[in-house]
Amino acid sequence: AQSVTQPDIHITVSEGASLELRCNYSYGATPYLFWYVQSPGQGLQLLLKYFSGDTLVQGIKGFEAEFKRSQSSFNLRKPSVHWSDAAEYFCAVVFMEYGNKLVFGAGTILRVKS
Amino acid sequence: EPEVTQTPSHQVTQMGQEVILRCVPISNHLYFYWYRQILGQKVEFLVSFYNNEISEKSEIFDDQFSVERPDGSNFTLKIRSTKLEDSAMYFCASKPRDTPVEAFFGQGTRLTVV
């Protein structure tokens, strides 16, 4: 079955430090990849997406992600974290061979310490 | 900026009661979805809807669930006889066409079954 794995349940970083959140997905010939952010009690906000082309994509709030097909990964990065980045981050994938629904990872809770 | 609107934001209902969760997708969108997120768990796909019919549904979406687009603007999720385990945040999403394009999510309805 299609699956998305976010191996880190919690991550704590210091404000100003760099961040990398990991995401791996099960095999799919044509994956469409997304990162969403959810603040407590809020909905899902799209940070960035990858469909094709340049494998390094830029998103909102200074985030970027790199698609590595050979590793089935789509890791999210930010060079300098701000306290307002504290939230839960979800990687999600559409496996076109299996319909057009989003398959979500379990999420990574980011804590930012000052 | 157009957005997906969900009402109510919170609903408390007694076990066995019927609930209807309402969503107003973005006006020119054609694909509609319901997802749910049980507290502390990942976001899960429930159902997708296109051209006035269900295009895909998950194992969660059993006979107790139904969806409807009654008037060309609203998109509703009905749970016929709620169970305790239906307590979750329910997200509506819509998108203008088939992938590749991102889905836009509403803020969610928190359903609590007591």
Image (tube, coloured by chain):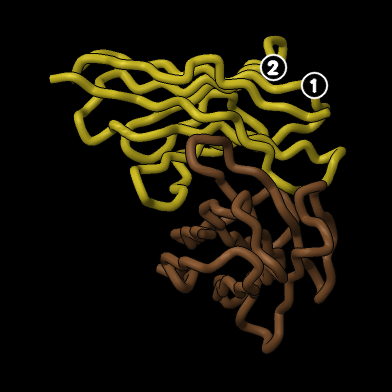
Chain colours: A yellow, B brown
Can residue B13 be seen here? Answer: yes
The residue sitting at 64% across, 16% down in the picture is: A68
The residue sitting at 83% across, 28% down in the picture is: A1
Q: Is residue B8 above or below residue B93?
A: below
Q: x, y (%) of residue A25?
A: 69, 22
Number of residues whose C-alpha sits closer than 10 Å to that of mark 2, classed few (under 14), some (14–19) or many (20 or more): some
> For mark 2, what is the residue?
A72
Q: Are marks 1 and 2 on the same chain?
A: yes
Mark 2 lies on a secondary structure that is loop
Q: x, y (%) of residue A33?
A: 63, 34
> For mark 1, what is the residue?
A27
Circle 1/circle 2 CB separation < 8 Å = yes
Can residue A50 be seen here? Answer: no
The type of residue carrying mark 2 is Ser
The type of residue carrying mark 1 is Tyr
Kindly identify which chain the residue marked by label 1 belongs to.
A
